[in-house]
Image (cartoon, coloured by chain):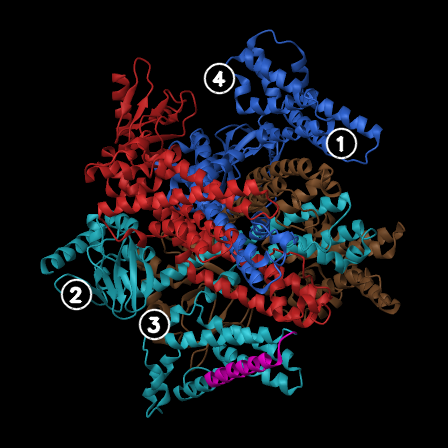
Chain colours: A brown, B blue, C red, D cyan
Amino acid sequence: MMGPLAERSGNRNSWSSLLIMPQRIDDLRPRLEFFRSRIYSTLQMCVLIAGLAAMAAATMPNIRPELRFWLSIVLWCCLAFYTFELSARLWLRQSSDRGPAYPLTATGAIDLLAVVPVPIALLFGLPSETAWLLASLWLLKVTMSVSGLSLLWRVISLELRALASVFVIFLIVLLFAAVALHLIEGPGQPDRFGSLPLSLWWAVTTLTTTGYGDAVPATFLGRAIAGMVMICGLGVFGLWTGILATGFAAEHRRRDFIRNWDHVTRVPFFRNLKPSAIIELTRMLRRVDVAEKTVVVRRGRRGDCMYFIAAGEVEVKLEPEPVRLGPGAFFGEIALLEGGPRVATVVTTVPTTLLVLDVSDFRAFTAIHPDLAQAVEAEAARRGGKG
Amino acid sequence: MMGPLAERSGNRNSWSSLLIMPQRIDDLRPRLEFFRSRIYSTLQMCVLIAGLAAMAAATMPNIRPELRFWLSIVLWCCLAFYTFELSARLWLRQSSDRGPAYPLTATGAIDLLAVVPVPIALLFGLPSETAWLLASLWLLKVTMSVSGLSLLWRVISLELRALASVFVIFLIVLLFAAVALHLIEGPGQPDRFGSLPLSLWWAVTTLTTTGYGDAVPATFLGRAIAGMVMICGLGVFGLWTGILATGFAAEHRRRDFIRNWDHVTRVPFFRNLKPSAIIELTRMLRRVDVAEKTVVVRRGRRGDCMYFIAAGEVEVKLEPEPVRLGPGAFFGEIALLEGGPRVATVVTTVPTTLLVLDVSDFRAFTAIHPDLAQAVEAEAARRGGKG
Amino acid sequence: MMGPLAERSGNRNSWSSLLIMPQRIDDLRPRLEFFRSRIYSTLQMCVLIAGLAAMAAATMPNIRPELRFWLSIVLWCCLAFYTFELSARLWLRQSSDRGPAYPLTATGAIDLLAVVPVPIALLFGLPSETAWLLASLWLLKVTMSVSGLSLLWRVISLELRALASVFVIFLIVLLFAAVALHLIEGPGQPDRFGSLPLSLWWAVTTLTTTGYGDAVPATFLGRAIAGMVMICGLGVFGLWTGILATGFAAEHRRRDFIRNWDHVTRVPFFRNLKPSAIIELTRMLRRVDVAEKTVVVRRGRRGDCMYFIAAGEVEVKLEPEPVRLGPGAFFGEIALLEGGPRVATVVTTVPTTLLVLDVSDFRAFTAIHPDLAQAVEAEAARRGGKG
Amino acid sequence: MMGPLAERSGNRNSWSSLLIMPQRIDDLRPRLEFFRSRIYSTLQMCVLIAGLAAMAAATMPNIRPELRFWLSIVLWCCLAFYTFELSARLWLRQSSDRGPAYPLTATGAIDLLAVVPVPIALLFGLPSETAWLLASLWLLKVTMSVSGLSLLWRVISLELRALASVFVIFLIVLLFAAVALHLIEGPGQPDRFGSLPLSLWWAVTTLTTTGYGDAVPATFLGRAIAGMVMICGLGVFGLWTGILATGFAAEHRRRDFIRNWDHVTRVPFFRNLKPSAIIELTRMLRRVDVAEKTVVVRRGRRGDCMYFIAAGEVEVKLEPEPVRLGPGAFFGEIALLEGGPRVATVVTTVPTTLLVLDVSDFRAFTAIHPDLAQAVEAEAARRGGKG
């Protein structure tokens, strides 16, 4: 889950760089980078899991005192970690002097929420177990490293009107079902349908198809209405899913296009194409972020795509000596042109962003724009002559 | 939920306008407008929530008599509000003299249903608690201010044939499962599977995956069939969702097109485009209704779209003095053309309808129709020269 | 649900035609038609509901003997009705002499299954209540009048391979969860998880999110695994829905195209269009079957589509005298061309098939193919000159 | 489920070929083929079902000793079968000498997992019933013969980022709901909400809408929050489904294109088409694998598609004598061109791969590319002259 952020930076020895006091403002950059490194995100994940596990364990009543002591130490350590993280970020951000005050940004607010509430609750005299429950706010830290969350948020906000309409249908069915069951089942089961709030509780568990079974209609008419409520529940669910599926498909396409466009325009190979062809190609390419020292293509495997390098570097393991390809180059085209297996293994040397063109799109595209195929073939021939 | 209606009108002092008797028929218009204003819709929402909460609370048996008295007053006040609303609308509509008689329209019928049933029930001697349950009809008032409901209705009516087919499959599985379980489990659990209606009740709770757990098969064969029924339930659900998702996607596109078309043709900037380009653009633009005094674009943020004003007015917060742009103008193009952050904050002055063109669509469109890009650039240059 | 079949034929006096013996083979046609008429399908529906209700009621143990007698009479009447239907169809089909033997067709098999099993079961000495449960086969008759069922079947058969893959995942999760819970919970709850079949029963109710609650894990590890099984259940469900939604969207488009094509080529108005334009138009038009004497367009309403008559006849309620339009004509175009409300009410005189062109598609199409717009305008002008 | 593999080979007498010792390396090929034949896959399926059923039955406590003995024999036989299969494959693969060592491939690992764990567990002294539970790993063998699994895997891996985002939302709602209910319901129901792990168990059963009903909130506030959790559950589910549906639709199209392309380029009939037309056609054609001696087209039925033979052979049952068509030929075109029923029955003679062109696509394609229609008509006329 923390992959995308971590992939961009692979400096393994960044711990030491944090401990030495920076001499100049320029020294801050690698320190800021540290907060995006892979070790740091792994550490963060461990702290979060340990903290939440300790919080959950501390609420159990039949726990031994010595274990409770150790849990408490884990919790205080996690809090110390988050306090350190908050103050480090505050100090770094302060000196960099860009944008709004740190505690007012979304990240800053989450960092503050992780640190402040628990001590305040303890100061106000809440019992220790209750106060530490506020540590559940630590989970919000995960949202910072999940890249797809803004996409989901946008889909939901765009489709809010339609989702609200379904919610109104949901409410109407809910209320009418509750009133009907209150009238029908109320006299027979006064402790389960005797008031409208009780009846609404039954209705919400039934309409969402949760079905606890604590309140179940007993009369024929009540059961017939309950059956209809369940079917309505499936329908409401289907509508909701339909709206979200539609919105998600549209937003997905749009987001991919924006991301790919920036990378496509950086590949010199595509610059000679007509603008309409670039648009088409941008829709076809899939962007993939690959960590360093990762095998992209393995010799002898069947190839079903070719790759353009948007950023980073790869090493083609050719026989006499390996060849390195930088941004703008492409590889994996021989399997597409000749239809055979991969002829060489390709490994990334640094974190690399690749644009993947599938065989289906390659064929569809080159059938309409033969110049790309010719250019790829010419380059492949040139390489063959050289290699 | 009441936003869309409220956005169109922002007259805050409309209360007073209602209290003065109108001199001429033309005076009726602002009074009709009042029923769409933001305060009024907030008031409506408060009355509805208070009324429904009071109705629900009044059904609780262990409530104190003095609280019951106050609940009763709240309910009568809500009824008075809806009676006033109905009579105001009847009187206004009568004088305006257009269309069919008000109580025969959908809105009129809902207004009538909110007022008439409770007093009639009380007159017919129903106990007070039962009679007030009819106040649940007040919830139907919400449907008037939810804009997406007609869209949902249309999707359902268009796909009715396919949905009915799934319902028939649902019924067949339901009946056959009930008969099988009645035969298998009937002898062992006569109070749960002893008759077909009892068995049908089990089948409907299982097929909808509600699973109350009040009737559970105990034999091996019964459980095997129950497992298959559950899997069928998932399948039926999937079919339903698939049908609704398909229908919703198609109807969504169609509806957006009709709405956008009217706005696109009003923007003078688009009139020089070829008809086929206008069609394309209409498919790309997203219509957004913005309330007055809302920040549309904030300086320094990353821009990923430009805006055309279909109706209303915005103020661009430029440095020497702010600039106002009216219908037909556009803004936010500099971030797209130059790829940098927003250079000025833009705020609406009145409720405004904007057409949003995302960066992906802007690039796709201008690549094929370079005249739009040139026109946008020329206008941007002209502005830069002036500002 | 029986609408589509019934709409094609509206002869109300077809009962009498059935009672007179046919003199010639040609007389058979109207009699066959009777089986598709609206009264007949209503009668069929009543018989089905009465029969199934009587069957369900007869299984209830605490029913009075005289009511049981009447239920039995209802059941025998329904059986007599189906026997009559089967023999009528056998006799009619035999004389018409086309296709395979009637009992071998799908319809014939369903007709046979409705009539034969109950008497056979009674002959073999089954108790009356058990034998009559076979009357649940009557429900299969509904499948004959549901038009969308073949579409569903085709989608399922096309996507069978993908659905089977999801089913395999389902089975693997099911078995592994059952084995794990049997090991973990078995010692503590031997009557619920003590054997693998018991544990599988728990797994299937959990994985389908039915959740009866008769078997619930009690240990920490068991509950952690149960939580993962529930999440897998949501995932399996989502995959299933995704596959069906995809398949349904594709098949829907294909089916509509085939149906519309036949009708579009019959409208003389479209014959001058280029083939590629006809293809486009066929994708845009929606086919609607309307019963006789139905209002299609009502004067004064907002118009958002125009209509082409594929088969049947409509009456335009113009002021001096109404005008009748037959197959190939169109109406409702004025609201699209001029943007105002409908200028006349249009009523069907016989069952009519209409092709509906929405305003969005009309504008999109005429922007690219202006000849259709011109032809529509010319025809509208000609009519205006005449009317 | 085992169909796709089985279809490719139909040699019924392959048992005997396995028993004779191969003289040369070339003799291995038919033996390898045996592992893909239809009888073998049926046998495999029977062994799997028998083995898993015996394993499940052996865990039941109240089973008779003599039955337990027989179950044990069945289990040992299944293990012997899988051991034989593993050693046969090891020996065959070793002599063929291609690719990596067999136990390191996915198939080899599954074969090893089916054989090794049970004896090891028995050796380590586990009780017999527990050890045999490892036989549930046999189910993994099914994944080898399910063709759609790699597609599902790819969809999931492509959408992993979005799915993970939804999972994070799921976790946040889960934890916050659990904390809230622990605080609200904890004092009243200490055995159900008294600790956070207990409360989390309630939250996961509710959020997945499973709803066991073992822990149910009793206070008003607790139930209000529970209702919101259920609605969030539906939302999370909807998001998940939407993501998977979108991803599945895209991947499905891509996969079909790659498969069809290889077959389309093998049909000589399509070679004269322009590349863009071939692309279009590849998108339209559906690939169908048909077993030998299967009726593809039945005389007198309504035809809604034509067929191109990509591989294999069919026999057209014409009147004087049947005609055989090989790869590259087509049939079923007369029903499309003339719109009538099928004029001849067509049966496959060997396992055949057909490319199906639906009537809708045929008409859409030939309207834009009339040369295909002419070629089909010319060939049909030539055949008519000959036949």
Where is mark 3, residue-wise? D8
Which corner quadrant holds the C terminus of chain B?
A: top right
Q: Furthest-top residue in view?
A: B23
Q: Is residue C1 visible to the viewer in this orientation of the structure?
A: no
- Residue D295 figure quarter: bottom left
Question: Do marks 3 and 2 share a chain?
Answer: yes
Which chain is home to disc 4?
Answer: B
* Real-space Cα separation, disc 1 to disc 2, in angstroms: 84 Å
Which mark is nearer the camera, 1 or 4? 1
Where is mark 1, residue-wise? B58
* Real-space Cα separation, disc 1 to disc 4, in angstroms: 40 Å
Which mark is nearer the camera, 1 or 3? 1
The segment highlighted magenta reads D62-86
Where is mark 4, residue-wise? B99
Give the camera-side residue of C65 and C172: C65
Which corner quadrant holds the N terminus of chain B?
A: top right
* Real-space Cα separation, disc 2 to disc 4, in angstroms: 71 Å
Does A76 sit left or right of B86 as displayed?
Answer: right
